[in-house]
Amino acid sequence: MKFNNRNVCISPRSKIGSNVRIGDNTVVYDNVEIGDNSIICNDVVLGEPLGTYYRDPDYTNPLCSIGANSVIRSHSIIYAGSRIGAAFSCGHQALIREKCTIGEHCSVGSLTDLEGEITIGNYSRIHSNVHISQRTVIGSYIWISPFVVVTHDPYPPSYDWKGSSIGDYTQVCVNAVILPGVQIGKKCVIGAGAVVNKSLKDFSLVIPAPSRIMDVRKYVVMGKGRVYPWMNRFDRGMPWEGIGYDTWIRQSGGAE
């Protein structure tokens, strides 16, 4: 373990892996596990206690785990009860609330707010300034662009929260809003500024102005042809990088 020894507070009830670097002014609470070769930058809080910590003298911090080879950038806060897979990275001032489960090779951008009880698959990218409400389920190989909002309260304020879901390989473009309880299928594209108020089947493309839904496989870009699904034209950081999506599917038995 390597860290700059200035105002660092690490609970003796935490577990720090090999070759972990921890920056200045960072706090690691009880029951935090940090995987090998991870980098925790300055002013980070890991294992932020839940609300009952301040009222219950018998409070025990739930496990917060960060997988190996992760990078947590400055001023980010990850709550107790969240579990994050290997090779995770986040931007600055990211907030990940309690009971989030995030797979491997995922990223969360600066100033993004994951409001708790959220499940995210593998290789999904959530960009900066995104707000995702509780009970949302996000699949694998998903891209969520800046300023997207995923909601969960159908008539606020209420207790009748309805989590939404986003299927594998789907793209959600800038400023889109997904309303409570909406189930979005696989390999969809939600256009910039769209408001999604009903569930969508696989391969749906939502175009906001004029509002319409079409099969994304029929969408044509001038000079490029049909560009969706996107997996055969983009591979950076994906498990099929350098070998092609179709080859990866055959070799790995990956699901379509």
Image: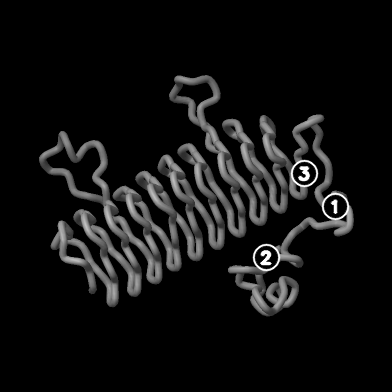
Residue beneath disc 2:
255
Along the polypeptide, which appears first: circle 2 or circle 1? 1
Residue 8: give x, y in percent of width and height: 17, 59
Q: Determine whether the residue tagged by mark 3 lies in a helix, strand or loop.
A: strand
How far apart marks 3 and 1 lie (CA) works out to: 14 Å
Question: Which residue type carries mark 3?
Answer: Leu
> Mark 3 — residue?
205
Give the camera-side residue of 104 and 148. Answer: 148
Mark sitting on residue 221: 1
Q: Which mark is residue 150?
A: none
- The relative height of residue 130 versus residue 10 in the rendered view (above or below) is above
Q: Nearer the viewer, mark 2 or mark 3?
A: 3
User: 10 Å neighbourhood of mark 2: few (<14), some, or many (≥20)?
Assistant: few
Q: Position of residue 238 (x, y in %)?
A: 61, 68
Q: Helix, strand or loop at disc 2?
A: loop
Q: CA distance from mark 2 to mark 3?
A: 21 Å
Classify residue 49 as left or right of residue 230. Answer: left
Evaluate if marks 3 and 1 touch, with contact meaning CB atoms under 8 Å apart. no
Q: In which quadrant is the C terminus drawn?
A: bottom right
Say what amino acid the circle numbered 1 marks: Val
Who comes first in sequence, dot 3 or dot 1? 3
* Image height of 204 relative to 208, above or below: below
Picture coordinates of residue 143, whole percent (x, y): 61, 53
Q: Position of residue 209 (x, y in %)?
A: 78, 31
Q: Earlier in the sequence, mark 2 or mark 3?
A: 3
In terms of image quadrants, where is residue 124? bottom right
Give the residue type that dot 2 points to: Ala
- For this rendering, which residue is in front, 221 or 86? 221
Q: Does the rendering let one see residue 178?
A: yes
Residue appearing at x 59%, y 48% in the figure:
144
Horizontal side of residue 198 vs 11, given as left or right: right
